[in-house]
Amino acid sequence: EAGVVQSPRYKIIEKKQPVAFWCNPISGHNTLYWYLQNLGQGPELLIRYENEEAVDDSQLPKDRFSAERLKGVDSTLKIQPAELGDSAVYLCASSVQGRGTDTQYFGPGTRLTVL
Amino acid sequence: GEDVEQSLFLSVREGDSSVINCTYTDSSSTYLYWYKQEPGAGLQLLTYIFSNMDMKQDQRLTVLLNKKDKHLSLRIADTQTGDSAIYFCAESMGSSASKIIFGSGTRLSIRP
């Protein structure tokens, strides 16, 4: 079974440029998460989808960040414009809602560097 | 607010046991987790424990939960070089496993 797939793995951009990250969750997983992981820190939730609905986006900085999961499968996270402080690893995770511990399975992440 | 705290570093000799400690704040957490992150990789769930348990053993891993003190520990027996990684403690927010709060991670290094 394929795991959570993310692309690109690395991205270097200049500040004020837009950037987008893509995530393909594990097949059959209806819940998808985007996390931000700063260096030396644990992941922090940005947004959680159940199917195509964003059920928790309280930590998403909506002035520059946006996300979508149009058909309830793949998801895209966008930053426009990027700032220096956005340099971090962006992790995607997926789970099956309503089954026991709802174990979250993580992708390898996209490491963003903003110059 | 919610907070999960861990020590930043731990160094152990190969073959010894490693004990990684964590404290959390949400007394209503139903699930407590240990995740492992190797360089350049995402987080991998190692084990979890329900809040109504005080111990769980899974091969070389032993999780101890002291709910009164809100203290969680992970013991790795016979630590190997492949155990070098960052270990994250995490708590669920109340009974929902969909929202979990992570600690800052403990970097485990193995010396020969």
Image (cartoon, rainbow, N blue to C red):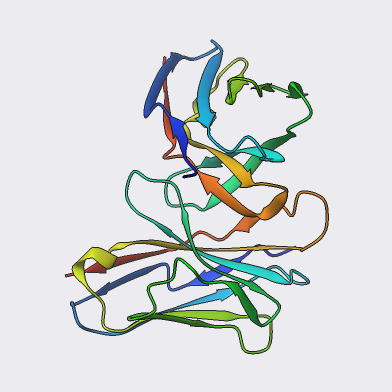
Please name whichever residue, A41 or B69, is drawn nearer the observer in this view of the structure: B69
In this rendering, position of residue A15 left or right of residue A41: left
Q: Which image quarter is the C terminus of chain B in? A: top left
Query: Residue B15: x, y in percent?
Result: 55, 12
Query: Residue A55: x, y in percent?
Result: 62, 73
Looking at the image, the residue that sits furthest to the right is A99
Query: Residue B109: x, y in percent?
Result: 41, 25
Please tell me whether residue A81 is drawn above or below residue B37 in the rendered image: below
Residue name at image x 74 percent, y 68 percent: A29
Residue name at image x 34 percent, y 43 percent: A40
Please name whichever residue, B71 or A27, is drawn nearer the observer in this view of the structure: B71
In this rendering, position of residue B55 left or right of residue A110: right
Q: Quadrant of residue A4?
A: bottom right
Query: Residue A34: x, y in percent?
Result: 52, 67
Residue name at image x 49 percent, y 52 percent: B41
Please tell me whether residue A79 is drawn above or below residue B42 in the rendered image: below
